Image: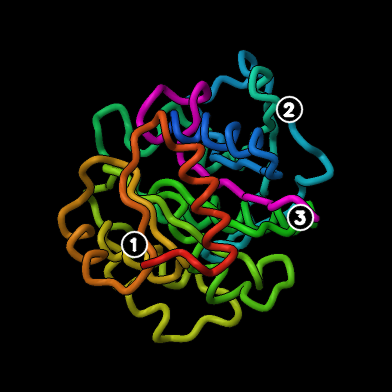
Amino acid sequence: MEKTKVLFVSQEITPYLPESEMSLVGRYLPQGIQEKGKEIRTFMPRFGSVNERRNQLHEVIRLSGMNLIISDTDHPLIIKVGSIQAARMQVYFIDNEDYFQRKFVFEDENGEEFDDNDERTVFFNRGVIETVKKLRWTPDIVHCHGWFTGLIPFYIKKSYFDNPLFSEAKVIYTIYDNDFTKTLDPAIKSKLRLAGMKEEDLKIFDNPSFFNMTKVAIDNSDAIAIGSPQIDPEVQEYINKLDKTILPYIAEDDIVNVYSDFYDKILAGNYDK
């Protein structure tokens, strides 16, 4: 019997970024799932605050070299990889000089959110999918963590649904108490458009607020998980009304066993809503 394959797409992973609720899950959940006998791949953005020398990142030439077109401009997709030796786990980094070569993650030194966060999330999410295609690796589960990964479910369900690498994948989106306040550029609607998308699918991006971006991720996921004790009240109210599989918040000590069982039940189609 083949191993279950789990693709982790994380906004934050420690030790590459400071410890937080999300970065700790991004670090220890993939390791635990791998130790449970599942096969994993893990991705995150190569934010400028990630120290390449200290973390011994290096470019994967065979995966790099593609250009992603956003707003009629070619943006080189650079793939780097690092290893967490204690976990025997590799992490793939999506990099690009225009979007990630800055000292801060989502805000500048004055706390102002970057005006191009819309393009950055489009580039990252598409970059992950295109890199998985180059790896020719077929995930059974795609597990996304944090709002910056929220276009992955949309892309898989609306554009890559007939790609054999993703057509059978179950998508899980974990919601954290981690948001943005400034509505993204409405031009994101045209920037993220790919073949297969319908106009009604894109309409919500006329107002790319945190709630609407989260709603897109939720609506296009097969299951939802809650990653923080408290999440945005509007988002919580929305998911309370859904007929969708939802995994409540769980303490860090139990996370590996609970998620491993959750994956198995989602794939078997027998998880109670």
Majority SS type along the magenta span = loop
Residue 202 lies within the magenta run: no
Q: Nearer the viewer, mark 3 or mark 2?
A: 3
C-alpha distance separating marks 3 and 2: 21 Å
Q: Which of marks 2 and 1 is in front?
A: 1
The residue identified by callout 3 is 137
Packing grade of label 3 (10 A; few <14, some 14-19, many >=20) is some
Horizontally, is 18 left or right of 270 in the view? left
Magenta segment: 1-22
> How many marks can you see?
3
User: In the picture shown, does residue 234 fall above or below 260?
Assistant: below
Residue 3 lies within the magenta run: yes
Label 3 secondary element: loop
The residue identified by callout 1 is 213
Q: Seen from this angle, which residue lies furthest bottom?
A: 199
Q: Which of 240 and 14 is in front in this view?
A: 240
- Residue found 43% across the figure and 86% down from its top: 199
Position in image of residue 263 (x %, y %)? 54, 54
- Residue found 39% across the figure and 31% down from its top: 252
